Amino acid sequence: AQRVTQPEKLLSVFKGAPVELKCNYSYSGSPELFWYVQYSRQRLQLLLRHISRESIKGFTADLNKGETSFHLKKPFAQEEDSAMYYCALYSGSARQLTFGSGTQLTVLP
Amino acid sequence: EAEVAQSPRYKITEKSQAVAFWCDPISGHATLYWYRQILGQGPELLVQFQDESVVDDSQLPKDRFSAERLKGVDSTLKIQPAELGDSAMYLCASQHDTDTQYFGPGTRLTVL
């Protein structure tokens, strides 16, 4: 069975500091991983997917198959980055997402 | 920009009552999902539709929950009777040919 683990429920950093949100997964096939974000009073939305290897709003995430991790990183956090972040594993054959429990990021001024 | 619509946004009901939630996906999106999100947890899939057909309802508590998408467009999720443990956010999402799911604003259900 596939599983996504986000070990930190809460994470606080100061503005301008680096931030890393951890995500580990278990999956028997070739994984497709995503980060979704939910800003206050907004709907859940896609932030980035590993397959496109893009940087969105300064965030990047690298898939490490050896460590089965997909950590989200940003070198200089901004206050507007404060939000709930969910790591998700996509099963292409079933077209289904399995979400982690989320990490609430707070960027302090 | 097209968005997934859900109503109502909030619903308070007493246990043993019936409740229904509605979802209108983005036009042309054949795949529709209903998720339940309990406070402090990530969304969990309840049911998945492809057009009007149920693809996966293995996590749907079928003794009290039902879902339909009669014309392959909008969808309704029903709970009858509601129980205290059903209090949660109910999210709808739709997907086209790509792997991106687009989420609605959700319906927050409180069962008293």
Image: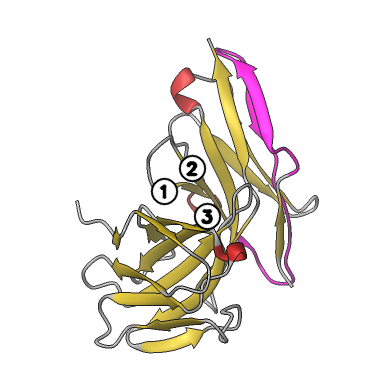
SS class, disc 2: strand
Residue B25, position in %: x, y? 28, 67
Distance in Å between CA atoms under marks 3 and 2: 17 Å
Boundaries of the magenta span: A7-32
Distance in Å between CA atoms under marks 3 and 1: 17 Å
A31 sits to left or right of A96: right
**Which residue matches tag 2?**
A37
Residue B11, position in %: x, y? 39, 58
**Which residue matches tag 3?**
A51
**Which residue matches tag 1?**
A45
B105 sits to left or right of A56: left
Give the class, few, some or many, for how many residues have Cα within 10 Å of label 1's Cα (few <14, many ≥20). some
SS class, disc 1: strand
Q: Is residue A76 visible?
A: no
Question: Above or below — where is B101 with respect to B33?
Answer: above
Residue B101, by quadrant, is bottom left
Answer whether residue A101 is magenta in the image: no
Between disc 3 and disc 2, whose residue precedes? 2
The amino acid type of the residue labelled 3 equals Ile
Q: Residue at x 49, y 77 (%)?
A: B47
Q: Are marks 1 and 2 on the same chain?
A: yes
The amino acid type of the residue labelled 2 equals Val
Q: Residue at x 53, y 73 (%)?
A: B46
Front-lying residue, A71 or A97: A97
Q: Nearer the viewer, mark 3 or mark 2?
A: 2
Q: Determine the residue located farthest toward the top in the rendered image.
A: A109
Distance in Å between CA atoms under marks 1 and 2: 5 Å
Front-lying residue, A29 or B112: B112
The amino acid type of the residue labelled 1 equals Gln
SS class, disc 3: helix
Q: Determine the residue located farthest toward the right in the rendered image.
A: A67
